[in-house]
Structures are given as structure tokens and as C-alpha cells.
Image (spheres, rainbow, N blue to C red):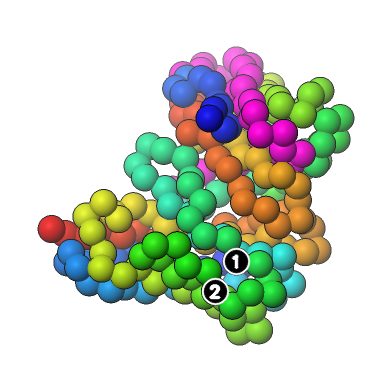
Amino acid sequence: NAGVTQTPKFQVLKTGQSMTLQCAQDMNHEYMSWYRQDPGMGLRLIHYSVGAGITDQGEVPNGYNVSRSTTEDFPLRLLSAAPSQTSVYFCASSLDRSGNTIYFGEGSWLTVV
Amino acid sequence: KQEVTQIPAALSVPEGENLVLNCSFTDSAIYNLQWFRQDPGKGLTSLLLIQSSQREQTSGRLNASLDKSSGRSTLYIAASQPGDSATYLCAVLNTNAGKSTFGDGTTLTVKP
């Protein structure tokens, strides 16, 4: 039972570098999303997708891009890393957007220096 | 804009005690409310999901209630154990945007 798999677990970037956080789920879920979790600010939605080929912005989308070419995969791209993007990133999925259990990945710890 | 508040932010209890965690939300137009557990360095694990038409859900020693009209939910943990130590978050799925709003969580410590 893989569930939601995120890679890498830990990453250190230099300011201005780009990278992609990978997220894959094997539950045939239509709805996938990316959150960042910061002390004192809780979980904030970055981008989400309601199905392959469809993405939309969440609460804090600036500096991030997403795409959804398949049902299984939902990568998050940091275009030009900034220290303000130092955070823990979580990918989540659910069957659809109308009220099913949300499953989270284990998180990706990103430090931008 | 939906706001979710969890009080207290931290709670420390002796083993065996029954306890209640609180979650309040400002907009009652929700599909459901979920309670999650988060262990240090880990992702969130769903504990209970209450649909907007339901009043409560139970799983083992956990019982969650929902009063949508007053914008409140409680998570009751019976006979607490040290293994229950974690951060507990609630999240509401809003009908108007189809997105979830999370509380900041209550960090629970159960002392042996």
C-alpha cells in the first residue's frame, strides 16, 4: 500500500536554483493538492488539481508551478528558489473534491540558503 | 473567508485521562470536517471524517462530534495513552470553493 509518495524527503537549495518536488499516488484519486506548513501559519494550499490536465491556484501560488499530465502524478516546481520558500511541503490526494478522506504524503523538507 | 481555530494550542495530561480537543469554524457551508493526527516529522493521518449531515463519528477510543450550526467540532479521546502524543488538526471542506481549510492544531502530550 504505497498511498501518496513524495520525493525527495530532504533538499537544500541555493537561492535562485530550481527544482521539482515529486508526488505520486496509486489510489486512482482525481483530486490532488500541494500544501506548505510553516510554524505559526498552519497548512496553506499552494496549488491543486481536480483531474488530469486541470490545475488551479490555491492560497499561496506565487513562485510555484504545477502540471497534471496523468492521474497518478502531480509535481510541484520551484522556479527560482527564495529563502521564503524554506518550508515543509505536503502532497495530498482524495477520491474527488466533494468530501472524501484526504491522504497525505510524508512531507518534503526544503531549505533554501 | 473560512477561518478554523483550535484551542488550546497545547495540552499536557497524565495517562488515563479523558480529554477533549476543540475546533471552531466561521462558515457553516461545509461538506465535511476531518480530524487528523500528525507525528513529529511525519505527514497527516486522517482519524475521523464527519459529513455535514452527520452529528458524530467514532473509531476506537476516539469520538468526534459536529455542530454545524454553531461552527464547532470536538474530538474526544478516552483513556489517553502516551502513544496518543501528537499534534491533532481539524480541517473543513468548504462547499463554495471545494477546498479545505486547516486549523493550526493542538499539540497533545500524554505523560506516563
User: Does the CB distance between marks 2 and 1 fall below 8 Å?
Assistant: yes
Q: Going from the N terminus, do you reach mark 2 or mark 1 first?
A: 1
Disc 2 is placed on an element classified as: strand
Q: Is residue A36 visible?
A: no
User: Counting other residues with Cα less than 10 Å from the Cα at mark 2, is it few (<14), some (14-19), or many (20 or more)?
Assistant: some
Q: Residue furthest front?
A: B60
Q: Which residue is nearer to you in this view: B7 or B78?
A: B78
Q: Which residues are magenta?
A: A12-39
Q: Which residue is more in the foreground, A40 or A34? A: A34
Observer-nearest of B49 and A69: B49
Q: Secondary structure at mark 1?
A: strand
The disc placed on residue A6 is none
- Determine the chain carrying the residue at label 2: B
Tell me the tag on residue B50.
1
Q: Residue at x 51, y 20 (%)?
A: A8
Question: At x 72% / y 65%, what residue is drawn?
Answer: B31
- Gap in angstroms between the C-alphas marked 2 and 1: 6 Å
Q: Is residue B47 above or below residue A1?
A: below
What is the quadrant of residue A4 in the picture?
top right
Most extreme residue toward the right, as rendered? A53
Say which amino acid is labelled 1. Ile
Residue tagged by mark 2? B56
In the image, residue A56 sits, relative to residue B76, either above or below, namely above
Do tags 2 and 1 sit on the same chain? Answer: yes
Look at 38% across and 54% down and name the residue there.
B87
Report if residue A98 lies within the magenta region: no
| CA neighbours of label 1 inside 10 A, class few (<14), some (14 to 19), many (20+) | many
Label 1 marks a residue whose chain is B
Q: Position of residue A75 (x, y in %)?
A: 68, 25
The residue sitting at 86% across, 30% down in the picture is A53
Residue B25 horizontal/vertical position (percent): 60, 72
